[in-house]
Amino acid sequence: LTDVSALAGCATLHTLSLSNCFGVIDVSPLAGCVTLHTLDVRNTYVADVSSLAGCPALHTLHLPYCERLTDVSALAGCAALHTLNLWSCTGVTDVSSLRGLANLITSISDSDSESESEAEESELEG
């Protein structure tokens, strides 16, 4: 699988696993999936998740081993986001923009101690 554009605007999509779909690099077509609750794109080449801010129901996002990913700040617009797994996303060095998500639980690789510390602070402040 390389292209998820057929899912664009899917009004009833709730859960989608693209785990280990190495050809998937773009999740922007999912921006209009207003009922998307859980997305798993672990171990893919996704580098940009900014379009997911257009998924108001997004609750759980799994991004482990998305090593090309560097910026998750747009996810601050996902008010329903509860679980964010960034395990081994070594390019993500700053999660401070997510502090406003009061119920967010974040898993981050221990190889990035600064981001882990920020995430822990976010959980405590929330």
Image (cartoon, grey):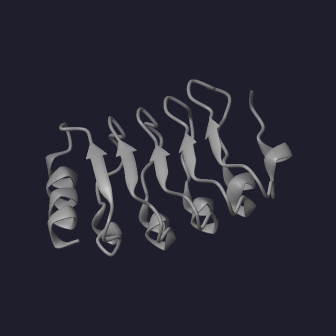
Quadrant in the picture for residue 86: top left
Q: Nearer the viewer, residue 114 or 76?
A: 76
Q: Position of residue 19 (x, y in %)?
A: 56, 28
**x and y, in percent, of residue 48 in the image:** 56, 52
Quadrant, the C terminus: bottom left
Q: Position of residue 116 (x, y in %)?
A: 19, 51
The answer to whether 112 appears left or right of 35 in the picture is left
**Could you say which is closer to the camera, residue 61 or residue 57?**
57
**Who's the residue at 47% across and 41% down the image?**
68
Q: Give the quarter of the figure containing the N terminus.
A: top right
119 versus 99 height, above or below: above
**Residue placed at 59% from the left, 59% from the top?**
52
Residue at 49% x, 56% y: name it: 59
Percent from the top left, x then y, of residue 97?
34, 70
**Viewer-proximal residue among 16 and 87:** 16
Q: Is residue 20 above or below residue 36?
A: above
Q: Residue furthest bottom?
A: 100
In the depicted structure, whether residue 5 falls above or below residue 49: above
Count of numbered marks: 0
Side (left or right) of 74 relative to 112: right
Viewer-proximal residue among 8 and 110: 8
Q: Residue furthest right?
A: 6
Q: Residue at x 55, y 37 (%)?
A: 41
Q: Is residue 24 above or below residue 102?
A: above
Query: Is 16 on the left-hand or right-hand side of 67?
Result: right
